[in-house]
Image (tube, rainbow, N blue to C red):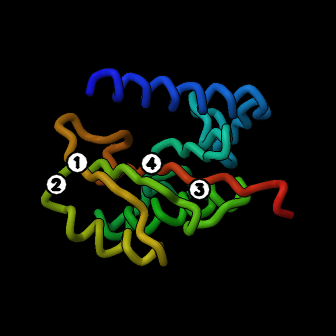
Amino acid sequence: MRQLIASAVILGAAALVGTSGHAEPPVHLAPPGTMGELPFSEAVIYGGFIFLSGQLGVDPATGKLVEGGIGPETRQTMENIQATLTRAGATMNDVIKCTVFLADIEEWAAMNAEYVKFFDRKPARSALGTAGGIALGARTEIECLAAAPDDDAA
């Protein structure tokens, strides 16, 4: 059994190496506007995927967290994710996986009420509460992995 698992891991790694050898270099998308000074890429497109950094419920026009708690923050977070995907040439239907971080796991239902409005097809998801809080005092942070558009299909 160990040999079978080891073979599967080696084959999987070989497949990744084989595809990444022909891939273009990663494309790094900077956060929009005044948020462009942040110390990370908003998203990185590589190997057929779009890796989105965690998004907060920040109004891109002001750079400040929206008011009103978990509901409005989640809505703004999802709008920010949608805008990032649009800049990368993708849509919410291309999202494969999301990870949701909550300042208080008791707010899961309120977060989920907004989150589900953004998907026709539900991606895989994990959600967890944080012990030390979230940047800017946010109630939620959501990161996603999406399929990159196939440039050859155009």
Sequence-first tag of 2 and 3: 3
Sequence-first tag of 4 and 1: 1
Separation of marks 4 and 2 at Cα, in angstroms:
17 Å
**Mark 1 element type:** strand
Sequence-first tag of 4 and 2: 2
121 relative to 44, above or below: below
Residue hosting label 4: 143
**Mark 4 element type:** strand
Residue hosting label 2: 105
Q: Position of residue 124 (x, y in %)?
A: 38, 58
Which is more toward the observer, 98 or 75? 98
- Dots 1 and 2: beta carbons under 8 Å? yes
Residue at the spot 56% in from the left edge and 43% down from the top edge: 51
| Front label number (1 vs 2) | 1
Q: Is residue 42 visible?
A: yes
Neighbour tally class for label 3: few under 14, some 14-19, many 20 plus, Cα within 10 Å: some
